[in-house]
Image (cartoon, grey):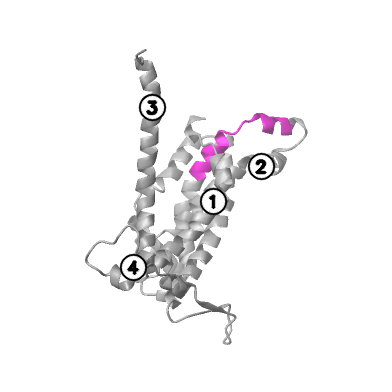
């Protein structure tokens, strides 16, 4: 019996979906695989004018051992003593971690309450305020470089990690506020109403009912804030120009071996894997639709 056209469409759709997913995986993983290959080839093969093989013939992990060769509790004090091979790299790792550890909690502390108010409450000019929050991310970073530089000079933090934290907050807070506003807007209100019926005040509902519901959104936005800070190049370069000891990871990429780039992906991948269950369960709606 011949296959009818609806049956063919039913067979064609999963095939096209699988092909699209395969192309997306190749698009995403090929650069990462090529970067890893370049990190394990020898120096002679790396500078060779001929293209590398897909599988290195004599892989070496010397660059990784040089990057990870540190001595704890040095005699001169401090926590770690970098080797002569990776002084700048360890400094940049330390700076990026310190900045991210400051940006993520500050972003969540400011954005989550603001997003709850924008997503759950109804007040005058709410939509205008939401659009204004989004528009703060619409301009290119170079448009605010000079105002930021002047502000940091007046505050006395120009060329320091505090300035990078403030600049990164200007990137992460609007984005996280918008995402969490849509997330809060899509949460069922019946649980909050039940809490109010049981005698909880609005602040009691926010304290006891909302946190379990908001955990997936908070986890996803923590990853977003971390990525925003970890991968920023423009503000780190503009603020720390000429200060090598204050550079973050993106600023030392051009003078670092490929192994350094591979290791810089580890915290991002580890954070995403650790929070993947919460991220998958997140549902985002358009806050302007509610």
Reply yes or no: does residue 187 show up in magenta.
yes
The residue under label 2 is: 212
The residue under label 4 is: 254
Figure check: 55 above or below 280: below
Q: Is residue 127 found left or right of 219 in the rendered image?
A: left
The residue under label 3 is: 13
The residue under label 1 is: 273
Quadrant holding the N terminus: top left
- Disc with the residue nearer the chain's start (1 vs 2): 2
Task: Judge the density around disc 2: few (<14), some (14-19), many (≥20) Cα neighbours within 10 Å.
Answer: few
Residue 117 circle label: none
Q: What secondary structure characterizes most of the magenta part?
A: helix
Label 3 and label 2: CA atoms lie apart by 38 Å
User: What segment carries the magenta color?
Assistant: 177-196
Q: Nearer the viewer, mark 3 or mark 1?
A: 3
Label 1 and label 2: CA atoms lie apart by 20 Å
Residue 143 position, x and y percent, is: 33, 55
């Amino acid at each position: 019996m011949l296959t009818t056209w609806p049956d063919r469409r039913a067979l064609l759709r999963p095939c096209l979906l699988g092909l699209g997913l395969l192309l997306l995986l190749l698009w995403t993983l090929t650069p990462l695989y090529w970067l890893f290959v370049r990190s394990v080839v020898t120096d002679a093969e790396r500078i060779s004018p001929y293209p590398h093989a897909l599988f290195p013939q004599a892989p070496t992990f010397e660059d990784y051992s040089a990057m990870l060769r540190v001595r704890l509790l040095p005699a001169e004090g401090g926590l770690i003593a970098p080797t002569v091979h990776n002084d700048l790299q360890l400094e940049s790792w330390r700076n990026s971690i310190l900045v991210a550890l400051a940006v993520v909690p500050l972003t969540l502390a400011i954005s989550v309450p603001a997003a709850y108010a924008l997503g759950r409450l109804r007040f005058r000019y709410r939509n205008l305020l939401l659009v204004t929050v989004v528009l703060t991310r619409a301009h290119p970073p170079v448009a605010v470089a000079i105002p930021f530089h002047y502000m940091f000079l007046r505050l006395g933090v120009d060329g320091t990690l505090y300035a990078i934290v403030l600049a990164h907050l200007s990137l992460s807070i609007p984005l996280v506020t918008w995402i969490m506003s849509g997330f809060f807007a899509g949460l069922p209100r019946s649980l909050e109403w039940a809490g109010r019926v049981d005698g909880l005040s609005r602040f009691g509902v926010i304290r006891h009912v909302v946190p379990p519901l908001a955990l997936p959104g908070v986890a996803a936005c923590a990853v977003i804030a971390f990525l925003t800070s970890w991968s920023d190049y423009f503000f780190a370069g503009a603020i720390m120009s000429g200060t090598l000891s204050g550079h973050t990871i993106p600023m030392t990429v051009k003078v670092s071996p490929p192994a350094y780039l591979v290791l810089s992906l580890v915290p991002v991948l580890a954070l995403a894997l650790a929070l993947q269950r919460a991220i998958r369960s997140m549902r985002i709606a358009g806050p302007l639709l509610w």
